[in-house]
Image: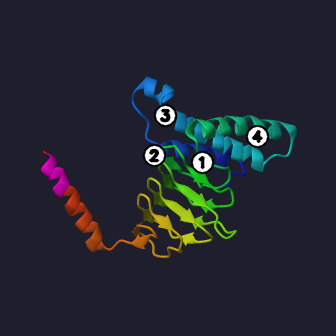
Amino acid sequence: MIRTKADLLEYIQEDKRMQPQPSSFVKRYLGTSGAVVRWKEYLRKCEYHHNVSKNIYHRLAYLVYLFLTKRYDRRFCSEIPINVFGKGLLIWHPERIIINPESKVGDYCALSSGVVIAQAHGECPTIGDHVELMIDSKVLGGITVADNVRIGASALVIKPITEVDTTWAGVPAKKLTIRELLKCRFLFALISATKV
């Protein structure tokens, strides 16, 4: 959680470091990737001014940055509330991301389009550090996801993931073993070879 100006600068720096920047000036300032960087910066500044709102300046700055953040929320049809994500947030595709404000996500999390982190039965998930959530993956309920976990595309996680450094996929999500991962890579290589 951002409580000081030093925290704010660290969070913004780590967010920018994690987000790939296009080399083209036009794409950086008019394209989606530049908009994502600005969106995350406004989100972090909004968090800072909300958390230290002791005087009128911080309250007014909070409202300004909240307005700017919500503008990007509407642009991308997403809802990313303040004080949920740790530093180093990476957003690959910003569209249709829905996050419950009561959820907690650790540092260096990666999101893609259609990710949902939501409550079920009145409880919200807690997600560890270095977790990757792929396209249309969903994490529901009062569960805990361990560090260094990859959740595959369209996976539905409704049970706790306690094993560190694992890959999960399916509905409901199941742990993929080494054999299944190698089988997937073999099939991908086979399909790629037949297209040439």
**SS for tag 3?**
helix
Q: Nearer the viewer, residue 84 or 129?
A: 84
Find out whether residue 74 is within the magenta segment: no
Q: State the separation of the CA atoms marked 2 and 3.
A: 10 Å
Q: Tag 1 or tag 3, which sits nearer the N-term?
A: 1
User: Which residue is denoted by mark 2 in the rendering?
Assistant: 92
Indicate the position of residue 138 as horizontal and vertical percent values.
52, 61
Q: Tag 2 or tag 1, which sits nearer the N-term?
A: 1
Mark 1 crowd level (few <14, some 14–19, many ≥20, 10 Å Cα):
many
Q: Which numbered mark, 4 or 2, is in the foreground of this view?
A: 2
**SS for tag 2?**
loop
Residue occupying the far top of the picture: 26
Q: Quadrant of residue 143?
A: bottom right
Residue type at mark 1 is: Tyr
Residue at the spot 70% in from the left edge and 47% down from the top edge: 47
Which residues are drawn in magenta?
190-195
User: Which residue is denoted by mark 1 in the rendering?
Assistant: 11
Residue 32, disc: 3
Figure coloring: rainbow
**SS for tag 1?**
helix
